[in-house]
Image: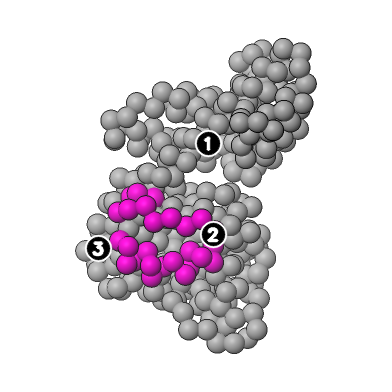
Amino acid sequence: MLLADPRARSMTRTSAAHVSNFSKRGEPQVSERIGFIGLGIMGRPMAGHLVDAGNAVTVWNRTRNKMSALVERGESPREVAARSDITITMVADTPDVLDVILGSEGVIHGVRRGSIVVDMSTISPAATREIAQKLSERGAEMLDAPVSGGEKGAIDAALSIMVGGKPEVFERVLPVFQKLGKAIVHLGEIGAGQVTKACNQLVLSLTLLGVAEALTLARKSGVDPAKVRAALLGGFAQSRVLELHGQRMLDQNFEPGFRTRLYHKDMGIVMETGRSAGMPLVGGALAAQLYQVAMNQGLGEKDYSVLARIVAGLGGGTGE
């Protein structure tokens, strides 16, 4: 199946590709035409699931070097939107979303009245609302639908999807979401998905910090941190973070699942969201500062659990 390898899906900045709407068994499928913009570590497997499910999918990405499996090249995000009933964006940051949707060759110039733009990136709630307003002036609807679950969740089609926007628009796109994730929640009006993702990253950062500090405290106190982790997993302190990232910390395995530079960006969104709501985020501010330290130490391409190395350094060690 075209685009079947989740690690080998990409398009050029000046290219798009249309994939026919046939199922794995070769049977014609009647479905919404889908555009997918952004074929990075998350977007590639996500777009692949939509193709494998029999949808007609048009894809676009900035990178030029992985397009051998793709056909019928187009020109821009604008063209992707013009070909699609539902256009999904999955890019790195707020400026990237603004560019691919509102830029000179952006989605907004190709959308048709009644079409839907779904942004699954993690960006500012305020920017999300601005984009939605501009799209509405063109007669198009928007959902913000950031995800949690990382690369593994994207590959396994097991993402948690947090959705903001009109209920009737959510219902129309729900069959698409169901091909990408397991926990799909409609949270309210446009921007609610991004606020929820900010809450997710806040909880995750503080849990990571707690695990890193606990394992470092055990080590400095002369207790085997691996045994401490095992004991904690059997009690009320157990969590997926302790289970998965606690093991990463013990192994000093910081090869990226989710890169620190992206989490640093997300923590900036968390703090911006807190300021907008008039909510002091004391723990969040501490975590954001520690991720800034990680960036200053050149750890931006490491997994975000590398926070453990920063915490160990505060205690005069390396975490090993």
Residue underneath mark 1: 204
Q: Amino acid at mark 1?
A: Leu
Q: Position of residue 200 (x, y in %)?
A: 47, 41
Is residue 176 in the magenta section?
yes
In the picture provided, is 228 more to the left or to the right than 174? right
Taking 26 as reference, is 136 left or right? left
Could you tell me the amino acid type at mark 3? Ser
Q: Is residue 154 above or below residue 265?
A: below
Does 175 sit above or below residue 308?
below
| First in residue order: circle 1 vs circle 2 | 2
Viewer-proximal residue among 26 and 111 = 26
Residue positioned 43% across, 77% down in the render: 32
**Quadrant where the N terminus lies?**
bottom right
The residue that appears at 39% across and 56% down in the rendered structure is 186
What are the residue bounds of the magenta stretch?
166-193
The C terminus - image quarter: top right
Query: Farthest residue toward the front?
Result: 235
Label 3: which secondary element: helix
Which mark is drawn over residue 136?
3
Q: Which mark is residue 110?
A: none
